[in-house]
Image: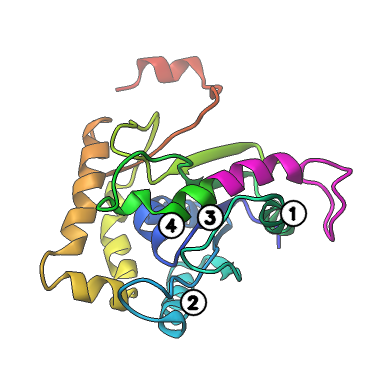
Amino acid sequence: MKVDVLAFGAHPDDVEIGIGATLIKLIDSGKKVAIVHLTKGDKGTYGNAEIREKEFKNFLKFTKASGEILDFRDCEIEDNYENRLKIVDVIRKYKPEIVFAPYHNNRFSHKDGTAHPDHIATGNLVRFALRYAKFKNIKRKEKEHLVKRLFYYMLPRDKLPNIIIDVTNYINKLEKALKIYESQIKPLDKTKNLFTVIKSFKTLHGSLIGCKFGEGFLSEEPLKVDEKILFEI
């Protein structure tokens, strides 16, 4: 089950909307990618558990990623020791080099979709589980595993990314992939073109690095880079 990249989300479509183009780009480069959602998102306004799970499986098939949905209850994700161990099991199962997770804090209101309590709880569960996953004396089914890097997506509006991936050449494939989530996309298209909104954020991040579309992340620890990057534009 070993993968290069493991991306966590609270609900089906969180990862896909947030960093789908980056994951598609990584898969295209030969990396093995897994997406794991904690819930089926069945308490949302649109769709139900069966529909959202089916859409998720179709997305995996389309992008050639792997993954699964865990048994957490939608809108009831809590950061506690027992739940951290559930995430430890996932990390040790997939043994990724790097992990993506929603940002672990957000001060904005109920109108801001990124500030869903499940997103925040998922971010906290993952960052603590990564620590536990490397401890030899936390005995689980799988042996300990050290993840090299944790990158956050779904950043609150007052947090700028410090890593941005150019996804200009993958935005069209992302749009096709996101159409698979018909239960979530179609109802919102009656009042606004959701993908236009999604692209606006990716346009903003792209503008920060001089490209058309980008997906931004935050690393809370320094990254080692080659000195040549200092001269790149």
Secondary structure of residue under mark 4: helix
Q: Tell me the CA gap for discs 4 and 1.
A: 20 Å
Q: Which residue is labeled 4 in the image? A: 15
Query: What residue is at 31 percent from the left and 76 percent from the top?
Result: 46
Residue type indicated by callout 3 = Phe
**Front one among 232 and 58:** 58
Q: Residues within 10 Å of mark 3 (few under 14, many from 20)?
A: many
Disc 3 to disc 1: CB gap under 8 Å: no
Q: Tell me the CA gap for discs 2 and 1.
A: 22 Å
Q: Which residue is labeled 3 in the image? A: 8
> From the viewer's perspective, is residue 175 above or below residue 46?
above
**Front one among 44 and 189:** 44
Mark 4 or 1 closer to N-term? 4
**In the image, residue 173 lies at what x, y percent?**
31, 63
Disc 4 to disc 3: CB gap under 8 Å: yes
Q: Tell me the CA gap for discs 4 and 2.
A: 13 Å
> From the viewer's perspective, is residue 128 above or below residue 2?
above
Q: Which residue is labeled 2 in the image? A: 57
Q: Would residue 223 be found to the left or right of residue 164 on screen?
A: right
**In the image, residue 20 lies at what x, y percent?**
39, 56
Q: Tell me the CA gap for discs 3 and 1.
A: 14 Å
Look at discs 3 and 2 and give the one toward the viewer: 3
> From the viewer's perspective, is residue 229 above or below residue 212?
above
Q: Which residue is labeled 1 in the image? A: 92
Query: What residue is at 48 percent from the left and 72 percent from the top?
Result: 40
Residue type indicated by callout 4 = Val
Residue type indicated by callout 2 = Lys
Disc 4 to disc 1: CB gap under 8 Å: no
Mark 2 or 1 closer to N-term? 2
**In the image, residue 34 lies at what x, y percent?**
57, 60
Residue 192: name its quadrant: bottom left
